[in-house]
Every structure is written in structure tokens, then in C-alpha cells.
Image (tube, grey):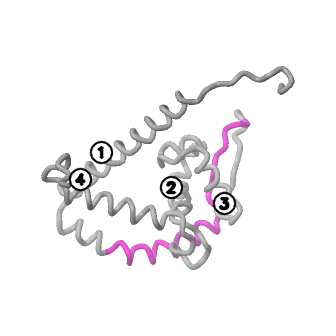
Amino acid sequence: MKLEWMGQHRAAVEALIRCGNSYAQGLNLRGLMTDRVDISAAELQVMEYILENEERRENMSQVAARLDISQSSFSKLVSELVRMGLLEKYRTSNNRKNVIIQPTDFAREVYRQYAIDALRGWQPIFDELDRMGPEAEAAIIRLLDVFSASMHAAREALLQREAEEIELIPLESSES
């Protein structure tokens, strides 16, 4: 069967799907990112964002939204990073529910070593982007942003549909 809806963009769709699948397969595997701690790519992504933006002191909801991670998944990732001694949680003095995450000195050490190794792995990608030029890089970023937004919208629509399909059943007086 020919998949005509993709038109002339079949190769690009396949590449996007393959890239997403490849990333998804390694996202939660521990030990791929650094030898210092058994950390997954998802956990490293959170730690990296916190390190890069620690002066912003964003609360957990803001960081989860920025990374497009569900609140529950983000909370689990942060709990694991706290357990490993890479992040610390703080409450603000004016709002006890406002939890701010900050990196530890150990996180900075781990990340410095990771960055050395990461550069080696990413260098072929950076070389290709340099070869392509800034206009092509900007176009790739736009394409990936559109893809990400479409996946986010599909996920939100599914969650909304599931929420609408839930039937509320009244509690019997003996159940309350």
C-alpha cells in the first residue's frame, strides 16, 4: 500500500520518526550518559536544564512545562536526581508550595565530565551543521519545533478525550 498522505516528504517523515524512536529507546536507559553515576538521558536532560538555568529559580511546574514533560514524570525524575545527590529541593519563603530545584556541587562535577564526553559524540553533528550553515540550521530547528508541537498537540488531544470519556459514578453513602 502506498502511503500517499506523505507525498514527496516520505524520506523526511521516516527520518523524523526514526530519530524519535532512537531517542525514545535510550531515554530511560541508565549508564549511557556518564561513568560517574547511573543516570538516564531523561534525568540528565533535567539536570542539564537546571544547571543552565539555576539563576532563574523556576519552580518544578515551570521546568516541567519548559521541557514538555508531564508533571508526574518530571516529579519522578527529580526525586531520583535528589536521591543520587545531584539536585536539591527548596521551598520559597513566600510560598511553601513553590518548590525550586537547584544543582549540587556533585552535579556540577558530573556534568563537567559528561560535557567532555558529550562533545566527542556530538562533534560530527556540529560539523555537519557548520557545513550546512546557519540558515539550514535555523530551518532544521523550525522543522523540529513544528514536529514537537504537533506531537504535543496530539498528546494533549488524547488526554482531553480520555478525560471526557471518564464516567463519574456517585459514591454510595456507605462508601464515603
Residue shown at 48%/49% (left/top)?
Answer: 67
Q: Is residue 83 above or below residue 123?
A: above
Residue bearing the label numbered 4? 138
Which residue was labeled with disc 2?
49
Q: Earlier in the sequence, mark 4 or mark 1?
A: 4
Q: Compute the Cα span from label 3 to label 2.
A: 16 Å
Residue 122 lies in the magenta stretch:
yes
- Tell me the crowding category of disc 2: few under 14, some 14 to 19, or many 20 or more residues within 10 angstroms, Cα based: some
* Dominant secondary structure of the residues highlighted in magenta in the image: helix
Residue 7 location, x and y as percent? 14, 49
Going from the N terminus, do you reach mark 1 or mark 3 first? 3
Q: Amino acid at mark 1?
A: Val
The disc, 1 or 2, on the residue closer to the chain's N-terminal end is 2
The alpha-carbon separation of the residues under discs 4 and 2 comes to 21 Å
- Which element is circle 4 on? helix
Secondary-structure class at tag 2: helix
- Contact between marks 1 and 3 (CB within 8 A): the answer is no
Q: Which residue is mark 1?
A: 146
Contact? badges 1 and 2 (CB < 8 Å): no
Check the picture and name the quadrant holding the N terminus. bottom left
Task: Pick out the residue farthest to the right.
Answer: 174
